[in-house]
Image: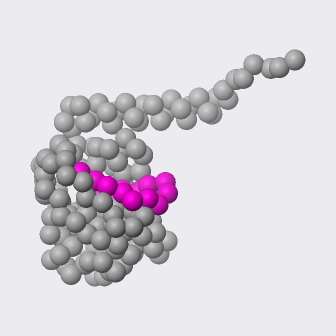
Amino acid sequence: MDRPFRFRPVVVQCLLAALAAASSAAAQDAQGVPQRLGTVRLNAGIHNIEAEVAQSPAERSIGLMHRREMPANHGMLFAFERPGVQCFWMKNTLLPLSIAFLADDGTVVNVADMQPQTTESHCSLAPVRYALEMNQGWFAKRGIGRGAKLTGAPFGN
């Protein structure tokens, strides 16, 4: 006799938590409220970066939308489950940003400047799992471009 399928309490709790996070992120976006996420310290040579980490699809879809300002050495690291060609746009993003697409070891694949409130796509030139958004010009002012290497916990160093 087949037994009916039952969710285990832990599975149900995980599903409910994921749904709550997704609806919270959607509510923030709909209200124009910037999301605030946990941070990680990254380094680009002598330059320290405090980066919020967007890991879930909901967190990544909101990104830095609705922010009116961002401190000089702050940014947002987008972490994906697997490498792929990652593309970004700036819908509902008020700040001009630069984005560095990063290999698993923190090596910069390419950097692009993005204009606020546009739907123009900016894509990685190769499959990557990470992208780091900073205030526009941050990478250029520090001479950080293709082949430079960032360090920090996400990159295993």
Give the extent of the magenta segment: 75-90
Q: In this view, does 136 lie above or below 33?
A: below
Horizontal and vertical percent position of residue 136 = 15, 64
- Which residue sits at x=26%, y=35%? 28
The foreground one among 8 and 90 is 90
Q: In this view, does 108 lie above or below 69?
A: below
Name the quadrant of the N terminus: top right
Horizontal and vertical percent position of residue 153 = 45, 68
Q: Is residue 3 above or below residue 52?
A: above
Instruction: Tell me: 110 left or right of 138.
Output: right
Horizontal and vertical percent position of residue 140 = 17, 75
Residue 42 appearing in the image: no
Horizontal and vertical percent position of residue 55 = 41, 51
Residue 58 appearing in the image: yes
* Magenta span contains residue 84: yes
Q: Is residue 72 above or below residue 14?
A: below
- Which residue sits at x=45%, y=73%? 105
What secondary structure is the magenta-colored segment mainly? strand
* Magenta span contains residue 148: no
Instruction: Tell me: 50 left or right of 106.
Output: left
